[in-house]
Image (cartoon, helix red, strand yellow):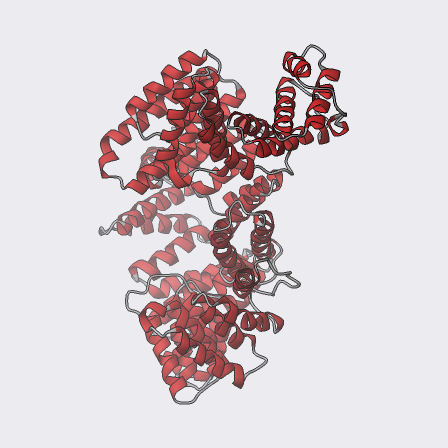
Amino acid sequence: MLDSGQLQSLYGQGNYQQCLEELNLLLLFNPQDTAALLLKGKCLYQIAVNEIQSGNEADLTFAASCFEEVLALSPSHEEAMTFAAYINIFITQADLPAAISYCNRLLTSADPMTRANALRYRQEAYSLTGEFDLVLKDLTTLAELIKEIYKKNLPALDQESGDLYFRKGTICLEKFADHSKALEAFREVLKHGHMDFRAFCRITEAALNHGDYETGGEAAVLAFFTDSPDPGNERLALYHQMEAFNRQGIHHPSLVKAMFTGQRIFADVVGGDTTELLSFARQYVKMYPDWFWAWHYAGAALYDAENYEAALPYLTKSLELGGTAIGLQRFIEAAYHVNGELPLITKWPEDLPMFYYNAGVNFNEFEASLTGTAIAPELLKIRTTFYRMSYDGFYDYFYNNSGKAGFSESHIFAMCCNNYGIALTDGGAYEQAADVHKLGYSLSPFWEQSQSLGTALMRLELYEEAIAAFNRALSDGGQHMGFADHIELKGEILTALSNLGRTEELTSLLQHTEEEYNNFIAEHGSGLSEEERFILSERYITVQNARHDLLSGGSIEDAVKAWQEQLKKHPDDNSAWYMLMQNYFQLKDYHQCIACANNYLSVKAAAIKPESMLKVHFMRGVSYLQIEKYGQAKADLMMVLSGCDPADESGRASICDSGMHLAKCCAMLQQWEECKNYAWDAITCYNDNGWKWDEACFATAIHYADACMATGEKQAAIGTLDVVLEMAPDNEAALSRKKEWKPGGFFSFLKKK
């Protein structure tokens, strides 16, 4: 027989049937074992509840009898009493007086949570017996007890209190017709929140019926913002009720704000063009000139219509008067569209964390449209700040017991952690990002959080931890994860294994992942849209990068064969074309390199990342140069030159390499002025960076000398040769030209540093 610890473990794991069988065996030898009887009752209860949840009938009689046996043996056993009272009141209603008696006894417990449950159960029993005055009394006592229990857990306090006060207000209204007491309770609901929008609809109705427009409008806004299904369109009906009050000339700011909110949320249904919405907002700008909401929604109407110049003054004024997180996001975008630059943000508005989170999500879309531009780093800082403001507010609410979140659901905070962590990783703050993702996962686990954590850990080169995070993402995602995400995660694990040098594991997983990919394409490929196929091929790049790392340990010829095999299986695999292009370049098979580059550009088209685009044009340009197609070479290399960042060392090196190749192209095309310019810039780059002259630099100097001679600058041409020969006395090209040209001056600029 199992001991008590093993039995509790089975119960904790949800193995109720096995636990029950073991308990029955134990109770044969000791039928008065109260701990075993209690656990048996709990197993029977859980089995019955599972049946009920599955839509089947269940008999809780046996569970209840177990708890009664425990109480017969131990009359003050609180857990048995709690179960017995709950089953009786909430499920069977077999003997309510006995259940109430249990609750009365539980109210003497030293454990405040036990007392709280006793009050919850007893008020429900009183409700069933029609004693609503006693229900209200218990709810009042319970509210005070909950404050004490959850004084250090604000989310739990809000959730419990919101439900409790809504029930209290509903009873005051429906059973006693006491509007004053009902609204007093409902205002507490607005402070604490509620998960069901219908609660806010009910509060709105009660408040408006009693002429309390402040409460009614506030409740309506919360109803509109609560994210839950509304098959009956109750919220839309609520919006129309706001409209009706407006038509009656009731212009209370709280109701007007509710109308503003409803107009945006139900825009597709209620219609209204920009002119109409703007006219409505302007009406309240005149009526309440110091109320930022009117300015905010006037600006929002124009922003939605992409009339940024007209929107900007309204959004600016709204922020001056207080503003919102979403308003700040719109202001930044409008200011950029109007002025061509990002505005100076002097103040971040006070707003709820959930609204800063939404602003960050919206801003991310704007930022994506400017990827690769000069202002991209500044945009990232702004996105990070939006999410930081959200994160800090949520953190205060969940961990410092202060503030207000807007929603008490920890999952929303976890989503914020994911987006904030991604922004931190994008900005290079990898350790902070990892900490944020770990916190988010502890709040509400979902696979995207683990993937983001893995990415941050990869940047920290903590590959073992990253593999664990990616594997957890695969496990958490399960059947809910798309295959493109699945294959990308496999690619990340392969990359980590490659970085760890675990070749055997890498080879095995690579083979398994390729089989998965091939099988998926064979089974589902014909049903995928062009966009879906493209996304899948993009995610497969991580796998192909790992293959590249593995193949790099062998010969280039073997790598070429491997990539050719990949293309036989998947001709539209852009990563295979890219890898093959590089291999042919290394083999100096320039015709094949050009063909692969063309195929890669054709398959991947506009989705190519800037850095990949530069590499393709460089390799294709050099390949054209080598096969003496100088015009095509020049066109490719000019694209490389225009796309490199001179602020980055690798960018400067690329600029220099491209310039030298362009100098040669122009020399071959006898475009001497351009040849001089490209050669001059390349040699200047060498000198400015303190790089030692190599054969490529000497060759470029010779091109410069040729260009000078061709354009009649003989002194500069001969001076250039002198500089080359000073550093490389045996340079044959310089020596041969020296014999042909008359001696001249010295071109002092070209001295090596």
Depth order, front residue of 66/617: 617
Name the residue: 34% across, 41% down.
Answer: 480
In this rendering, is residue 711 above or below 511?
below
Q: Residue furthest bottom?
A: 249
Q: Position of residue 121 (x, y in %)?
A: 41, 62
Q: Position of residue 160 (x, y in %)?
A: 48, 62
Q: Splitting the image into 4 quarters, where does residue 602 fall?
A: top left
Depth order, front residue of 670/582: 670
Name the residue: 50% across, 43% down.
Answer: 441
Name the residue: 42% across, 64% down.
Answer: 226
Depth order, front residue of 464/536: 536
Q: Quadrant of the N terminus?
A: top left
Q: Position of residue 496 (x, y in %)?
A: 50, 26
In this rendering, is residue 336 above or below 587?
below
User: Is residue 265 visible from the viewing direction of this image?
Assistant: yes
User: Is residue 109 visible from the viewing direction of this image?
Assistant: no
